[in-house]
Image: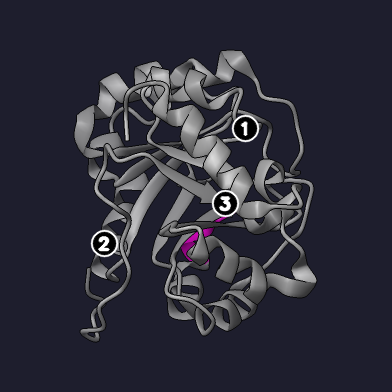
């Protein structure tokens, strides 16, 4: 995918391939470059960047300046999850900083199709996110235009929360809605035990934070999630 200035950006892998996507929310922030290098060494293609504003969610994390510094350290795809109010005001800054994909919350955007189109014109892919309490029909008119739908399986804001089975079941409906050409991502409580559940429902993009960065051996933790996904016969 190319930006308006002709620069070729990393892009999300083709839908249907199972991707483990480490979330740096749980990483060692004093060693982020090293953590990204470990993700790359594990053979992964994508890393998840949680952006929180302290308004839409009760936490504050990173912004464009940090992403720009990280961009200089790696060619991993930056799957950038904007948990912020008024995402349309900030997407230029995040794209300029090096975001390759931007997911925004349906709960924060009045004109989702316009924002998706704007992101595509900027040379990045676009995603829609549903909070656990948000019904799937809220994204139905817009889902086919997106490149990924993210189903939150915890309340957004903090890592280390318990997996919400009822929220995860929405993946079934989302997959039916978007078909095989759009990625379906899950975020929250993903580990080797919950991975077969969400992959069985139709998810192909697995965001994991504590299950990877909370372990001494990050690569072994990644391999454990990959092995759990393979039990569903998808890869």
Disc 3 packing (10 Å; few <14; some 14–19; many ≥20): many
Label 1, residues with CA under 10 Å away: few <14, some 14-19, many ≥20: many
232 relative position to 123: left or right = right
Q: Is residue 55 above or below residue 177?
A: below
Q: What element carries label 1?
A: loop
The residue tagged with tag 2: helix, strand or loop? helix
- Residue highlighted by disc 2: 120
In this rendering, position of residue 234 left or right of residue 46: left
Q: Which of marks 2 and 1 is in front?
A: 1
**Mark nearer the viewer, 2 or 3:** 3
Res 222 seen here:
yes
Q: Which residue is tagged 1?
A: 191
Give the position of the C terminus as an image quadrant: top left
Mark 2 vs 1, N-terminal side: 2
* Residue 145, image quadrant: top left
Tell me the residue that label 3 is attached to.
22
Q: Which of 160 and 97 is in front in this view?
A: 160
Q: Give the range drawn in magenta.
A: 84-89
Q: In x, y percent, where is residue 85?
A: 61, 53
Residue at image location 32% in from the left, 56% down from the top: 12
Element at label 3: strand
């Amino acid at each position: 995918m190319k930006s308006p200035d002709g620069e070729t950006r990393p892009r999300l892998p083709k839908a249907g391939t199972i991707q483990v996507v480490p979330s740096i929310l749980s990483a060692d922030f004093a060693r982020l470059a090293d953590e990204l290098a470990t993700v790359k060494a594990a053979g992964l293609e994508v890393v998840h960047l949680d952006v929180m504003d302290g308004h839409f969610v009760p936490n504050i994390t990173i912004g464009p300046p940090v992403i720009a510094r990280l961009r200089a350290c790696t060619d991993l795809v930056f799957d950038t999850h904007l948990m912020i109010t008024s995402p349309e005001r900030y997407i230029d800054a995040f794209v300029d900083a090096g975001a390759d994909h931007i997911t925004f919350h349906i709960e924060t955007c009045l004109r989702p199709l316009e924002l998706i189109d704007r992101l595509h014109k900027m040379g990045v892919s676009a995603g829609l996110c549903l909070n656990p309490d948000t019904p799937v029909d809220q994204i139905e008119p817009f889902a086919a235009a997106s490149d990924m739908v993210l189903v939150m399986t915890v309340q957004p804001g903090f890592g280390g929360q318990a997996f919400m089975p009822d929220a995860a079941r929405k993946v079934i409906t989302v997959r039916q809605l978007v078909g095989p050409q759009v990625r379906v991502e899950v975020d929250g409580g993903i580990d080797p035990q919950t991975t077969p559940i969400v992959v069985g429902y139709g998810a192909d993009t697995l965001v994991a934070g504590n299950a990877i960065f909370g372990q001494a051996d990050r690569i072994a933790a990644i391999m454990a999630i990959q092995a759990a996904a393979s039990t569903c016969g998808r890869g």
